[in-house]
Image: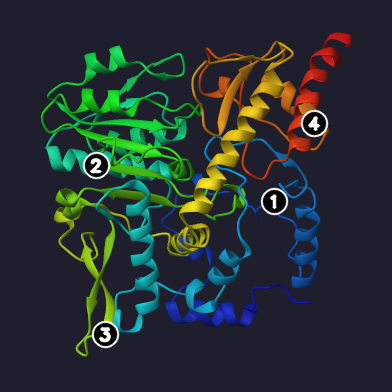
Amino acid sequence: MYPYIPNTKDDEQRMLEVIGVNSVEDLFSDVPSDVKLNRDLDLAPSMSELEVASYLTKLSKANSTIDDLTCFLGAGAYDHYIPSIVGHITSRSEFYTSYTPYQAEISQGTLQYIFEYQTLICNLTDMDVANASLYDGGTAIAEAAFMACNITRRNEIVISKTVHPESRRVLKTYAHLQGIKVIEIEDKEGVTNIDELKENVTDKTAAVIVQSPNFFGIIEDIKAVEEIAHSQKKTMLVTSVDPISLGILKSPGSLGADIVIGEGQPLGIPLSFGGPYLGFMATKKAYMRKLPGRIVGETVDVDGNRGFVLTLQAREQHIRREKATSNICSNQGINTLAAAVYLTTLGKEGLREVAEQIVQKSHYAFKQITKSGDYKPLFDKPFFREFAVVGSVDAEEVNKKLLEEKILGGYPLEKDYPQLKNGILYAVTEKRTKEEIDKLSSVLEGIKWRIMIK
């Protein structure tokens, strides 16, 4: 079978003649010869479609997925149950081939599900308005920081170190070239150090950013943080939340948040090797025109029928670049739909039940793992889905042993918090059974003794 690229030598020669050069090398004549490779790339010979399919199938079988392993790994991406209706609807061709709904008259379906998604996010967060979505939780934090700086005309952001480390790195990357100063607040016993926060919030602070439940899974005292943030005129409170936790926890809007953001992956979106995911953002009506991206609104047509339109489109493709709120070029359309279907399917009671199961199962796992004393709690604070423990064995070594038992272990905290040596962050979702949790506890208990015997 012939290689995939169909151009023959005659085809190549005719193309070269049309553009007036003798060889492909002539196309790169401006590149100095001493920086050219001057040899063929060290690649395997081309393969047919049949050979490629066979090779990729063989390669894929080398991977282990959550279908093969029992997952206790979280740290921002979670193994939740996804109702079958989510995949059924998102796989319909009219949705997965959709693009930006510029023409309302031919995009009513897309506009409606975005409108419904926005409404659901507002109900969940207790905020007035939500946008059509962001790329993921990390970029949502960066966009919220930009938004706060834009509103307050200030250029300092104060963020807790209990916010997801990757999100903080994204914020620093975005802020660097925008001239925004990022001040990080240390944690104290797994939560934001309130005393240090007080010292660093000034009349130059555009926003205070905190995450709850935070990266360690602990529920932060948002009200205390809110009082500090709002003690300075104009300073905004940005709260990053786990959407599932809002099934049982107080809404960020009721606690005084000005902007609410988060990662929407738990809302019916599969792990997918790390993405694409969904960043959500909601705010008060007063700040609506400063939201990045798009906002879909409801209207009526000439016949009085319900319809949907892009109400606000404050981005660079629609208005002068210098007046755009953000350079976001797309919303995560399919993931937005998945989140809307998931939330609609579960409803208030279903979301609450998922959250309650998570709390019960995660606390059961915590008790089972720590009861022997071989693994001790890193923090003594209320938690939702995740909890951190520490033992005498290196976290990476623990995870290797767990993997031998087909268990995907927790997140080694030393990667991002060097002071937490041997610390491991475990996540427990509603999918985990008592038998799976008991097996995790049993294997963990045996790891110490196997290491000692060696």
Quadrant of the frame with the N terminus:
bottom right
Q: Where is residue 360 in the image (x, y as percent from the top left)?
A: 61, 34
Disc 1 secondary structure class: loop
Q: Residues within 10 Å of mark 4 (few under 14, many from 20)?
A: some
Q: Position of residue 234 (x, y in %)?
A: 12, 33
Name the amino acid type tagged 2. Phe
Name the amino acid type tagged 4. Lys
Disc 3 secondary structure class: loop
Indicate which disc residue 42 carries. Answer: 1
Applied colour scheme: rainbow
In the rendered image, the vertical position of residue 32 relative to residue 107, given as above or below: above
Of label 1 and label 2, which has the lower sequence position? 1
Residue that carries the numbered disc 3 in the rendered image: 305
In the rendered image, the vertical position of residue 102 relative to residue 387, given as above or below: below
**Gap between marks 3 and 2, in whole Å?**
38 Å
Q: Is residue 389 left or right of residue 327?
A: right
Of label 3 and label 4, which has the lower sequence position? 3
Residue that carries the numbered disc 2 in the rendered image: 146
Residue that carries the numbered disc 4 in the rendered image: 439
* Foreground: disc 1 or disc 3: 3
Camera-nearest residue between 23 and 155: 155
**Gap between marks 3 and 4, in whole Å?**
57 Å
Name the amino acid type tagged 1. Asp
Q: Residues within 10 Å of mark 3 (few under 14, many from 20)?
A: few
Disc 4 secondary structure class: helix
Quadrant of the frame with the C terminus:
top right
